[in-house]
Image: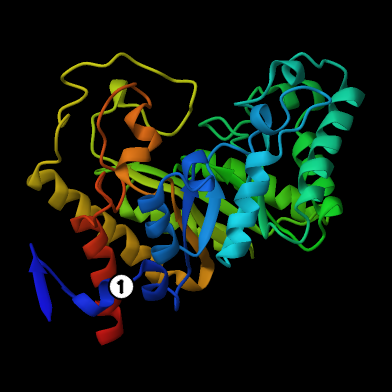
């Protein structure tokens, strides 16, 4: 049976599973929040198990939650995440070891370089060591760059200088020599920021410190970035001999304040009717644009699938997307492939249809 939606047609047989449809190309991942990890969101976990073969914890492994005070580690939810992943034979990505945000105050207060290096090493060894041989890959350093490609003035940079990145990757490799290690950041489609990431990767490679891949966060919108910039970023990173991951993929359909781009979680703005234009439902006109945008982007991913190991969405369905509360709290956003009722949207159908079209060529 062939169904037509807009300009798209897709085989109903092909809609069975994202992970099956894209198995010849790359893993399809999603981020799990605590309700998924604890399996309280039953319908959400049905989607996870049916459509995804890679999982990332949205928050529970971030420093302020997993290591809130010097002698306290909270492993209950991370343990549950790993147990779930093992039970369902998922590829698991740890997120994240060293990041300036969602960092407890006691780490921000450290000013002594020797102490901060030791704290960072202990944190990496404790967390990675607990899941050695279980978690397959880690986002070792997250969002270390400013938009112009310079180093972000995080506590790690202020106290340790740019060498903190090399130290973090070195410690991570020592903690689990078989684990894949990634640098993860947003706006890597922007040339200046991408050059900063390339500099970091080349410096690690020159020192013989393992880095296996780069995570290009896909916090994008209906018009930005250009398809050409996405393609260029993939090819630039692939040229370094590392694997590319598309991480944290979601496409906002709402206006951004002050033409904001990126994903700096510290930026927040006021809500208004203008900024929340679709509070009750997604209009067909916008739904069609979202489907076309996903189709165009996935065409690039398929084209460069030899260089891409994974495409991970940042959330299971629209109702749990962080974009409902960022950069403005209380909005209704529709950035993912499944709606709030756990049903596939046009965007899902366009992504599935694309694989079928590629198979027929």
Near-viewer residue (15 or 296): 15
Describe residue 196's horizontal placement relative to residue 12 as left or right: right
- Residue 258 x %, y %: 30, 20
Question: What secondary structure is marked by label 1?
Answer: loop
Q: State the residue at coordinates (56%, 36%).
A: 59
In percent of width and height, residue 286 lies at: 14, 44
Residue 94: image location, x then y, percent: 64, 49
Residue at the outermost bottom position: 360
Q: Residue visible at 66% across and 25% down?
A: 103
Neighbor class of circle 1 (other Cα within 10 Å; few <14, some 14-19, many 20+) is few
Q: How is the image coloured?
A: rainbow
Depicted 99 relative to depicted 17: above or below:
above
Question: Is residue 8 found left or right of 61 in the rendered image?
Answer: left
| Residue positioned most to the right | 114
Residue 359: image quadrant is bottom left
- Identify the image quadrant of the C terminus: bottom left
- Snapshot quadrant of residue 269: top left
Residue for badge 1: 16
Asked whether 76 or 207 is in front, the reply is 76
Across and down, in percent, residue 264 comes to 48, 28
Q: Which residue is at 29% across, 53% downward? A: 337
Judge whether 174 appears above or below 243 on screen: above
């Amino acid at each position: 049976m062939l169904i037509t939606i807009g300009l798209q047609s897709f085989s109903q047989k092909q809609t069975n599973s994202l992970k099956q449809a894209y198995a010849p190309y790359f893993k399809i991942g999603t981020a799990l929040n605590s309700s998924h990890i604890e399996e309280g969101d039953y319908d959400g976990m049905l989607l996870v198990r049916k459509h995804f073969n890679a999982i990332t914890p949205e928050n529970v492994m971030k420093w302020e939650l997993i290591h809130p005070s010097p002698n306290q580690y909270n492993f209950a939810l991370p343990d549950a995440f790993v147990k779930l992943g093992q039970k369902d034979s998922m590829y698991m990505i740890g997120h994240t070891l060293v990041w300036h945000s969602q960092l407890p105050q006691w780490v921000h207060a450290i000013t002594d370089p020797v102490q901060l290096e030791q704290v960072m090493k202990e944190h990496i060894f404790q967390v990675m060591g607990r899941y050695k041989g279980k978690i397959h890959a880690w986002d070792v350093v997250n969002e270390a760059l400013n938009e112009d490609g310079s180093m972000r003035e995080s506590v790690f940079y202020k106290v340790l200088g740019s060498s903190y990145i090399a130290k973090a990757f070195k410690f991570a490799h020592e903690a689990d020599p078989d684990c894949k290690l990634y640098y993860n950041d947003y706006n890597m489609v922007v040339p200046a920021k991408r050059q900063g990431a390339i500099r970091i990767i080349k410096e690690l490679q020159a020192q013989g410190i393992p880095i296996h891949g780069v995570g290009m966060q896909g916090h994008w919108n209906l018009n930005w970035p250009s398809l050409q910039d996405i393609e260029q970023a993939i090819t630039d990173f692939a040229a370094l001999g590392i694997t590319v991951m598309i991480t944290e993929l979601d496409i906002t359909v709402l206006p951004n304040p002050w033409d904001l781009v990126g994903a700096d979680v510290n930026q927040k703005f006021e809500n208004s009717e203008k900024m929340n234009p679709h509070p009750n439902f997604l209009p067909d006109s916008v739904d069609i644009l979202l489907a076309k945008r996903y189709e165009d982007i996935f065409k690039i991913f398929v084209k460069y699938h030899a260089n891409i190991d994974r495409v991970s969405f940042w959330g299971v369905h629209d109702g749990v997307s962080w974009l409902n509360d960022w950069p403005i709290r209380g909005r209704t956003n529709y950035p993912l492939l499944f709606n709030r009722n756990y049903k596939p949207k046009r965007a899902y159908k366009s992504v599935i249809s694309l694989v079928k079209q590629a198979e027929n060529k």
